Image (tube, rainbow, N blue to C red):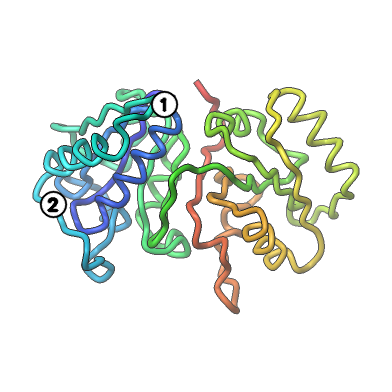
Amino acid sequence: MKNILVLINLSAGAERIAKLSLKVAQQLNANLLLCNVFELPVSKPLAYAGYDDMHNHAEEKPYTSIDELADNLKTHYYYEHRNATHHPKINRLQNIVFNSDKIKDIVAENQVNMIITGTHDLLELNNSGLLYVINKANCPVLVIPADVNFNTLDSTAYLTDLRYCDVEVVRFLRDFNAKIFVTHVSSSGIPDMEDAYAQSLLTDAIANRVGYNKLFLRNIKGVNRKKDLEVVTTTEAIQFFTIVNRKHYVLERFLSDTGDARRNYHSVPLLIMPYPNWYQA
């Protein structure tokens, strides 16, 4: 892990995303690159990065420049994390025209391994400019919804069909040193998988190749999958979900309208992995 690119605006809420990104950088032994997407020309409005005025928190303030936010973040880090084993560098992208169509170039030129940004509501991804950026990016994107806080991201549910589970995704998640609950949900039109076969598949095809002892199986079956996924989220204290983008419509199913009570798994951060042709450098 080298650099985490933080896409924010300077509205209230940007500081929260920046501070949470700093925690992730500390956990992954990475550095931060702050990018203000609003002070630069963009091909589409990126209202997802931080909050807009409708969602401002009274205790937060907007910033006048990305430099001011970076300086405040460094001061916060000094007082809160001065005894930490890793001290992330906090830099900002300057003199760069942010264009969502050129996100791959920005990632490559700055050796970015992950992007972090915020959104008011995960269910708004389907209709936001952020999803356009995610579809263009060739690195993982962590999206943090409103009112989320954490110290470390120490548990994730990787939602996948075990038959098509990506070993490189598990290797990337291993850098978090977190519990990884490989949460099997059969792809559309494919029968459910028996527990014993799912466990053997996880062990033989993934665990033995990755060499990581914090892998756990959660096998979701039947017609009440959304309810069962809520149970997994709560009982395992899942702090973020991991989904591979553009693969078997897993992301679309995760973000689909439930038609009833709001699902609790829509209120945790979501790590969206690129697909295809991606691997951890």
Nearer mark to the viewer, of 1 and 2:
1
User: What residue type is disc 2 on?
Assistant: Tyr
- Residue found at the very far bottom of the displayed protein: 260
Q: Is residue 11 left or right of residue 130?
A: left
Q: Is residue 253 left or right of residue 222?
A: left
Residue for point 11% across, 45% down: 65
Rendered view: 129 above or below 257: above
Q: Is residue 151 left or right of residue 161?
A: left
Which residue lies most toward the left here? 64
Give the x, y percent position of residue 158.
63, 45
**Residue plotted at (59% across, 30% down):** 174
Residue at figure coordinates x 73%, y 41% from the top left: 216
Number of marks drawn: 2
Residue highlighted by disc 1: 29
Counting from the top left corner in percent of width and height, residue 176 is at 53, 34
- Work out whether residue 32 or residue 105 is closer to the camera in this orientation and state it: 32
**Mark 1 belongs to which amino acid?**
Asn
Q: Quadrant of residue 256?
A: bottom right
Residue 59, placed above or below residue 273 = below
Left or right for 223, reference 117: right
Q: Between residue 24 and residue 145, name the one nearer to us.
A: 24
Foreground of the two, 10 or 41: 10
Q: Residue at x 35, y 47 (%)?
A: 117
Residue identified by numbered label 2: 63
Q: Residues within 10 Å of mark 1 (few under 14, many from 20)?
A: some
- For numbered disc 1, what is the local secondary structure? loop
Quadrant occupied by the N terminus: top left
Secondary structure of the residue carrying tag 2 is: loop
Q: Position of residue 185 (x, y in %)?
A: 74, 52
